Image (spheres, rainbow, N blue to C red):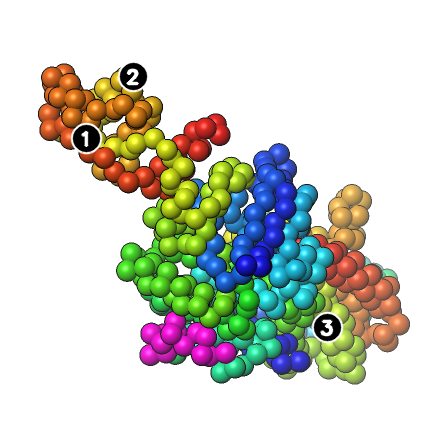
């Protein structure tokens, strides 16, 4: 026990003597969360809207009033049809709502500037959802779970999926490889301490640090970013712990494959980060990928973790809905840890 | 005297390159045994096998009667290993390093402090300095203290004096002699041939093979042929001229002079005169004592 304690103490000292790394590890996730949660947003606010009204009725009046009072829109004014076209071309408006009354029946047409596709699509959807409430148009839009399409909701699971894999695997692999580079690992190995004690002595401190990080990120998500809090947060915690263990195992595996700290950084930085961003569904929906890439994405732990987090944090469904993801993650953890422990066999 | 290390036919390959070929020797208990050889001779591989970090492909090695491949667990408490680079945690202080390595072996620093006290005395002045901020000589002393803190029976030192100034090197060999007095057997490797003379016995290792094992004096006596040091105003023409002479067996650069391995009948004064007549200025040839390096050059050439 005292050997284990002194291994942990040593690792904590390493961390304390390297405040820069710890700062990066704790600050980077916070910055990312806030950046994606507030600054970088795919939400569309303040769509500049023009209205062309064929015949003013109570109905059109009420409808325009609704747009005026909706914070998503800035109603620039009511204009003549030919003006609307010009203003749209000059970029002074994002969308035009054309309202006509034919035989007592209100119809509406939406013209959008699609030079920004994202904005055009979202604006159209917004306009439809506002307009459809009043008219007898058959489309009834109902966005479940995230009715305001807040991008923070979308990004929190993604960022958590990325941060843990990145930080846990990077820190463990670099820390193990640096001991190998300086041959202090040899001294640990020739001592009577058992290899599994050495490995645990490496993993436990980083596990604790990751728990701290998890607490920090969850607190931010549920307070500053305003994710709806529910009892499912408890499931988020244990699922994240499983994911952290998986990430630590990956770090250990990397450390057995490379021999320099730079290589460890590159492997855990590039090899893990790029697929996590591109293929995990964090940004690009997995369903839109070519089948081959969808297959690849199945191998990425973050994909399963992120998808489970969405179920728990945003849909807030009961825990049985994340059983498949949990099973995959547990299996991956088992495989990675077994491989790492086997490869970590130190006598050649 | 009992031998504490017994190595029989030890062979280790790394892919196609052979690091050790049929290495056989034993180290008597309570002696300083030197492993002499240039870089790449296989010294570190041999150390890693003895330290139970590598397993040999063929052959056996026992330390204190325990097989390095099979009984490594019991063996590990008996060995103090100091790898080639001073393996310390540079971001931990002197005291933290020492306590950490003590705890690995389940001992307290004070348990065996008497053993390291003479070595540690200079370091004791700055217990809170980071190991990374120490000078080469101080790092070496700290690494040695850490390797000794559990009072091992055998000390494995892999090139402990590389990168250390001459004064610290000499001081270090003094410390090794003190440790031998306390009954610790020491296997030390070096590529500095001048350090070989301070060992009780030495083994010359070249390309994974043992070229010779004996006491340093008896080994140098093996050179047999008389040895001369030659110098002149211009060294390269002198080297060519000497190599062309019939009674010169070998001639090679040795520090600032040339060493000439000659036949029994070699006449240094006559050669000097002959060379002057050839137009070489300031020619001087005088007899010198053979060193381990001369022997090494001879044996290594013979091997090739």
What residue range appears in magenta?
B112-125
Q: Mark 1 lies on which chain?
A: B
Q: Which of A251 and B296 is in front in this view?
A: B296
> Circle 3 sits in a helix, a strand or a loop, which is it?
helix
- Front of the two marks 3 and 1: 1
Badge 3 is on which residue? A241
- Front of the two marks 2 and 3: 2
Magenta stretch mostly in which secondary structure? helix
Badge 2 is on which residue? B246
Tally of numbered tags: 3
Q: Where residue A251 sits in the image (x, y, percent)? A: 64, 60
Label 2 to label 3: alpha-carbon separation:
81 Å
Which of the labelled discs sits on residue B285, or is there none? Answer: 1
Q: Where residue B30 sits in the image (x, y, percent)? A: 50, 63
Q: Mark 3 lies on which chain?
A: A
Q: Does the magenta stretch include residue B115?
A: yes
What residue is rendered at 63% in x and 37% in y? Answer: B15
Disc 3: CA contacts within 10 A as few (<14), some (14-19) or many (>=20): some
Disc 2: CA contacts within 10 A as few (<14), some (14-19) or many (>=20): few
- Relative to residue A11, is residue B180 drawn left or right? left
Q: Where residue A294 sits in the image (x, y, percent)? A: 78, 49
């Amino acid at each position: 026990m005292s050997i284990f304690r002194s291994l942990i103490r040593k690792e904590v000292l390493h961390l304390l003597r390297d405040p820069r790394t710890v700062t990066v590890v704790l600050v980077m996730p916070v910055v990312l969360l806030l950046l994606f949660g507030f600054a970088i947003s795919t939400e569309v606010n303040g769509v500049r809207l023009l209205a062309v009204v064929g015949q003013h009725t109570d109905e059109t009046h009420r409808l325009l009033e609704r747009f005026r009072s909706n914070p998503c829109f800035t109603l620039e004014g009511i204009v003549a049809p030919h003006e609307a076209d010009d203003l749209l071309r000059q970029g002074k408006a994002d969308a035009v709502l054309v309202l006509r009354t034919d035989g007592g029946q209100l119809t509406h047409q939406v013209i959008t500037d699609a030079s920004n596709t994202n904005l055009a699509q979202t604006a159209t959807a917004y306009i439809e959802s506002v307009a459809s409430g009043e008219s007898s148009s058959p489309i009834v839009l109902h966005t479940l779970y995230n009715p305001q399409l807040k991008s923070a909701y979308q990004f929190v699971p993604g960022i958590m999926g990325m941060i843990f894999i990145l930080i846990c695997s990077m820190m463990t692999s670099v820390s193990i490889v640096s001991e190998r580079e300086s041959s202090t690992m040899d001294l640990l190995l020739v001592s009577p301490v058992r290899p599994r004690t050495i490995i645990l002595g490496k993993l436990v401190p980083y596990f604790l640090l990751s728990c701290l990080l998890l607490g920090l990120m969850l607190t931010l998500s549920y307070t500053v970013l305003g994710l709806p809090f529910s009892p499912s947060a408890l499931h988020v915690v244990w699922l994240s712990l499983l994911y952290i263990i998986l990430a630590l195992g990956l770090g250990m595996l990397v450390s057995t494959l490379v021999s320099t700290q730079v290589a460890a950084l590159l492997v855990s930085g590039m090899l893990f980060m790029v697929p996590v961003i591109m293929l995990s569904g964090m940004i690009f929906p997995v369903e839109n990928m070519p089948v081959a890439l969808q297959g690849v994405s199945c191998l990425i732990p973050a994909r399963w973790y992120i998808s489970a987090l969405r179920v728990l944090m945003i849909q807030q469904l009961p825990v049985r809905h994340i059983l498949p993801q949990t099973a995959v993650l547990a299996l991956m953890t088992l495989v990675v840890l077994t491989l790492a422990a086997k490869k970590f066999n130190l006598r050649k | 005297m009992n031998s504490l290390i017994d190595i029989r036919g030890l062979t280790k390959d790394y892919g196609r390159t052979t690091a050790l070929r049929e290495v056989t020797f034993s180290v008597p208990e309570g002696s300083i045994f030197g492993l002499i050889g240039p870089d790449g001779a296989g010294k570190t591989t041999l150390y890693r096998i003895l330290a139970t970090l590598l397993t040999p492909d063929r052959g056996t090695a026992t330390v204190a009667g325990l097989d390095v491949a099979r009984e490594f667990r019991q063996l590990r408490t008996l060995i103090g290993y100091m790898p080639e680079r001073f393996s310390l945690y540079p971001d931990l202080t002197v005291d933290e390093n020492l306590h950490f390595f003590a705890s690995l072996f389940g001992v307290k620093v004070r348990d065996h402090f008497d053993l390291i006290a003479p070595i540690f005395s200079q370091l004791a002045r700055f217990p809170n300095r980071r190991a990374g901020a120490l000078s080469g000589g101080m790092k070496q002393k700290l690494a040695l203290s850490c390797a000794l803190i559990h009072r091992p029976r055998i000390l494995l030192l892999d090139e402990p004096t590389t990168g250390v100034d001459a004064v610290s090197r000499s001081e270090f060999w003094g410390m090794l002699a003190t440790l031998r007095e306390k009954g610790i057997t020491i296997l030390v490797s070096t590529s500095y041939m001048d350090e070989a003379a301070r060992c009780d016995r030495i083994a010359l290792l070249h390309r994974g093979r043992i070229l010779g094992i004996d006491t340093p004096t008896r080994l140098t006596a093996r050179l047999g042929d008389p040895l001369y040091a030659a110098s002149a105003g211009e060294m390269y023409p002198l080297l060519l001229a000497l190599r062309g002479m019939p009674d010169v067996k070998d001639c090679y650069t040795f520090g600032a002079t040339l060493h000439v391995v000659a036949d029994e009948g070699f006449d240094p004064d006559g050669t000097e005169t002959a060379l002057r007549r050839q137009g070489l200025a300031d020619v001087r040839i005088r007899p010198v004592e053979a060193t381990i390096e001369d022997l090494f050059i001879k044996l290594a050439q013979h091997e090739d």
